[in-house]
Image (cartoon, grey):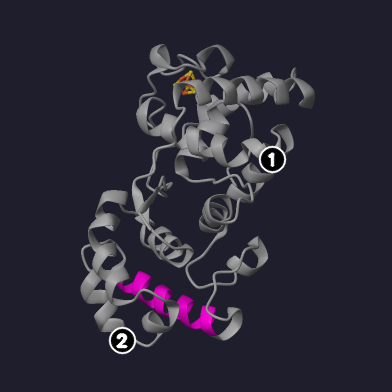
Amino acid sequence: MPARKLFVPSEGNSLETTQPVALISRQRKRESLKEKSARASAISARLAQAYPDLEVPLEYETTFQLLVAVVLSAQCTDSAVNKVTPELFHRFPTPIQLANTSLEEIESIIRTLGLFRAKARSLKACARQLIEQFNGEVPGTMEELTTLAGVGRKTANVLLGHAFDSPGIIVDTHCKRLSRRLGLTRSANPVKIELDLNKILPPDQWTGFSHRLIIHGRRICHARKPNCNACVVNQFCPSRNLTS
Ligand code: SF4
């Protein structure tokens, strides 16, 4: 089976400005849920035109490997993850092999990644849970996935969207920043942002929309200096040119 690739959101660090939120709040008072939903759909369509193919830098072949790669990608780059996963997947292709190895062995393979000790602990514990609670298979529901070590809603939504065809909004630092700047949510809480976006977009757009927001955040709507002049959704954005 050829290696698959997956675009993975990052946690990262970004500066959130308070000014856009104030502007957004003023605008929101004039915008009904129906209007916001229509605007979100227009933004989604523009982003789909701009980014028709979702970039997929993380490499994996199985759902278990996808889970491992996404856990490893927290607060580090996808390319860094891709450098360690070939050896990791070769030596520990299934949960039982990963669960039965030593922490030191896992650490020695992933030590170039940030937080490698915590990630090694999570991977080993997660593999053990998969064996003991899920017959060695990665479960396919949000409730089950979020019981696994190292797996939060963001990681679970990546798994659901890409391994189980179950749509979900993936709220990473870029999705969070852009959702607020675009006036699609007021909240800074990732779960609330997810629910706010769920309300204004149809389920079949959830995964793609959040991925495209992440791409757009990386390329155009940077945390410190958004390039509003080059932004394909600036006509729908209450924060446009705010930093110029
Ligand atoms: S118009 Fe500017 S602030 Fe709004 S989404 Fe585009 S780049 Fe970001």
Along the horizontal axis of the image, is 195 left or right of 2?
right
Along the horizontal axis of the image, is 118 left or right of 26?
left
Residue at numbered disc 1 = 203
Residue 196: image x %, image y %? 69, 39
Q: Secondary structure at mark 1?
A: helix
Residue 112's quadrant in the figure?
bottom left
Q: Nearer the viewer, residue 112 or 140?
A: 140
**Three-letter amino acid code at the position of disc 1:** Pro
**Three-letter amino acid code at the position of disc 2:** Ser
Residue at numbered disc 2 = 102
Residue drawn 48% across the image and 76% down it: 126
Q: Disc 1, ligand 1: is the CB inside 8 Å?
A: no
Q: Which residues are magenta?
A: 117-131
- Quadrant in which the C terminus appears: top left
Q: Is residue 81 a member of the stretch shown in magenta? A: no
Q: Nearer the viewer, residue 62 or 124?
A: 62
Res 146 seen here: no
Residue 216's quadrant in the figure?
top left
Residue drawn 64% across the image and 34% down it: 185
Q: Total of numbered circles in the picture?
A: 2
Along the horizontal axis of the image, is 196 left or right of 107?
right
Q: Secondary structure at mark 2?
A: loop
Along the horizontal axis of the image, is 14 left or right of 48?
left
- Quadrant in which the N terminus appears: bottom left
